[in-house]
Amino acid sequence: MVAREGNKGSAAAIVDSIASVTAHADRDMLETGLVETLHQLIQADRVAISHIVNKKIKLKLEINSSNVDVEGMTREKHPLPLDEAPYFKQCFESGKAVQVPYLVCFDKVYHIYPIRNLKDDIIGFIELIGTKLTESDGRLLNGLMQIYRNYMRILEESENDTLTGLLNRRTFDRKLEQILNEPMASNEEYAEKQTETQRRRSEYASGSNWIAVLDIDFFKKVNDKYGHLYGDEVLLLLANIMRTCFRQTDKLFRFGGEEFVIVIRSATEMGAGYALERLRKKVEEYYFPQVGNVTVSIGYIEIRPGDMSSEVLSKADEALYYAKENGRNQVNSYEQLVADGHIKPVEVEVNDDIELF
């Protein structure tokens, strides 16, 4: 691969590229900046980023200016099982860049590079297809990859709760705004396009987003009786239980103290409730060292396009408060509580951009 004319050896161009890659405080924009920068600086036919989701390699974004179509490369809407993609698997297991031999006879190269997270786990790949790298291009590529890894780790540190490793409140605010602003096809429109097998396997892709607010019951008593060290251990163990109950695509947040928030995808209220009930039972059945049994209360609601973030949270909180005032250790749907007459609907008045409850 050859650097584009006018850019090779240009310190200004390289500095501009670094600025472009690191100009974003958002993971998606950072990845977009990296792909665009690699494509501009190195004359590649294809640059792509993919993520590992549920042991499958899912294409996140790509620039394919030459319409390259090579056996084994990632493709939109067709995730590759990691175990069935030998070169990706080799890259994943070795932790090193892998050259795919398919294109050597055409004087092209196909490289796969690992992407690592804060814990140094491999969470995805960068694919690069084009002519053979010159020595200077190789150094430039390695430098940009290192800058990307370092900056991604900085982003992760800013996005995650320091105690549990779950996403933090600041990250939640941004993610919720993204969900509220994204267009979504209705469940009926999606269902018409799916086979029966896809409908059984793809509830995540088909459904709505649901937000759940979780609170540890009587957590203050845990801290008062056993001390904050054991209280922190309860928080850590609860976070681990939450990870085992939900998919990688679901989002888990710690707001602070004993309050957590979960954003999941489900086609139905029943499906969302089932997932949350499974979590509640696992927590109830778990023996926390020294402390013993701990329970949680959960309130949840569907996130609909056009909702206000504070309104969504307020309604989920209302369902949580009902649970805590009526026995705790339960999961409640806001909509169902309203329908059954147990609580009154939360009304939000908007006046000069100020939301009043």
Image: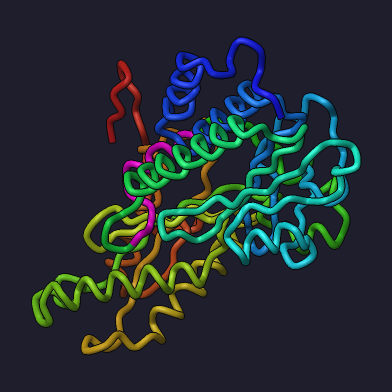
Question: Residue drawn at (51%, 31%), measured in percent from left and top?
Answer: 29
Asked whether the viewer can see residue 148, the reply is yes
User: In this figure, which colouring scheme has been used for the structure?
Assistant: rainbow
Left or right: where 204 falls relative to 241: right
- Height in image: 62 above or below 198? above
x, y percentage for residue 239?
37, 68
Magenta segment main secondary structure: helix
**Which residue occupies the extreme right position in the image?**
105
Task: Give the residues in magenta.
Answer: 165-178
Magenta stretch encompasses residue 177: yes
Left or right: where 82 falls relative to 178: right
Of residues 222 and 115, the one nearer the viewer is 115
**Which residue occupies the extreme top position in the image?**
6
Asked whether the viewer can see residue 341, the reply is no
- Height in image: 349 above or below 244? above
Question: Residue drawn at (40%, 32%), measured in percent from left and top?
Answer: 25
Magenta stretch encompasses residue 24: no
In which quadrant is the N terminus drawn?
top right
x, y percentage for residue 91?
65, 59
Question: Residue drawn at (62%, 34%), measured in percent from left and top?
Answer: 135
Q: Quadrant of residue 204?
A: bottom right
In which quadrant is the C terminus drawn?
top left
Q: Quadrant of residue 183?
A: top right
x, y percentage for residue 257?
22, 60
x, y percentage for residue 93?
62, 66
Left or right: where 209 falls relative to 16: right
Of residues 169 and 66, the one nearer the viewer is 66
The total of numbered circles placed on residues is 0
Question: Residue drawn at (85%, 44%), measured in percent from left and top?
Answer: 104
Of residues 302 and 75, the one nearer the viewer is 75
